[in-house]
Structure formats: C-alpha cells, structure tokens
Image (spheres, rainbow, N blue to C red):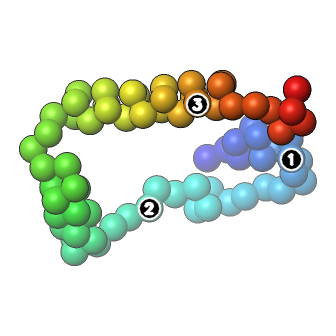
Amino acid sequence: MACPTSFSIWAPAWKPSGSNWASPSLDAATVELLIHQAQEAFGDRPVDTLAAERDRAQIAVLKALGESPTADGA
C-alpha cells in the first residue's frame, strides 16, 4: 500500500513498508468486549438516532466556537 500523500509532503524520504498499513485484527474476546460495551452504552437505539444526536452536539460546539471571542480579543 502506498504512503498517504500527507506523509509524503511531511517526510518525502520516509518509505513505510506495506506491513505498517495493515488493518488491525482483534481476537474474539476483544470483539465480544467491544460489542458488550456498545450494547451497554447505546442499548437498542437505532443508528439514525445516534447519528442525529451526534450531529446536534457537533453543531452546538461549532455555534459556541463561532460565538466565542477570538484569542486576541478582536
């Protein structure tokens, strides 16, 4: 797999091996743990509901940042 463009810009001499970009693999116990944690945290709520809540929270943060004074007081 080729080096991402951004890395090529920052470190053109760096040539990672393909193994550096392999997808992580998880053992069965870790997968079960992650599934259990997600079920406890989110229950049976539909993905669309979770996505809408996430989007509203992100919009609120962006609005708050837009209303906050700049660091230099301008």
Residue 46, above or below 15: above
Relative placement, left or right, of 62 versus 43 is right
Relative placement, left or right, of 25 versus 7 is left
Q: Residue 66: x percent and y percent?
A: 66, 25
Q: CA distance from mark 3 to mark 2?
A: 36 Å
Q: Residues within 10 Å of mark 2 (few under 14, many from 20)?
A: few
Judge by depth and name the residue closer to the eye, 56 or 6.
56
Identify the residue position indicated by label 1 in the image. Answer: 10
Of labels 1 and 3, the one closer to you: 3
Mark 3 and mark 2 lie on one chain; the one further toward the N terminus is: 2
Identify the residue position indicated by label 3 in the image. Answer: 64
Contact (Cβ within 8 Å) of mark 3 with mark 2: no
Relative placement, left or right, of 1 versus 60 is right
Which amino acid type is shown beneath numbered disc 3?
Ala
Which amino acid type is shown beneath numbered disc 1?
Trp
Q: CA distance from mark 1 to mark 3?
A: 33 Å
Contact (Cβ within 8 Å) of mark 1 with mark 3: no
Relative placement, left or right, of 9 versus 39 is right
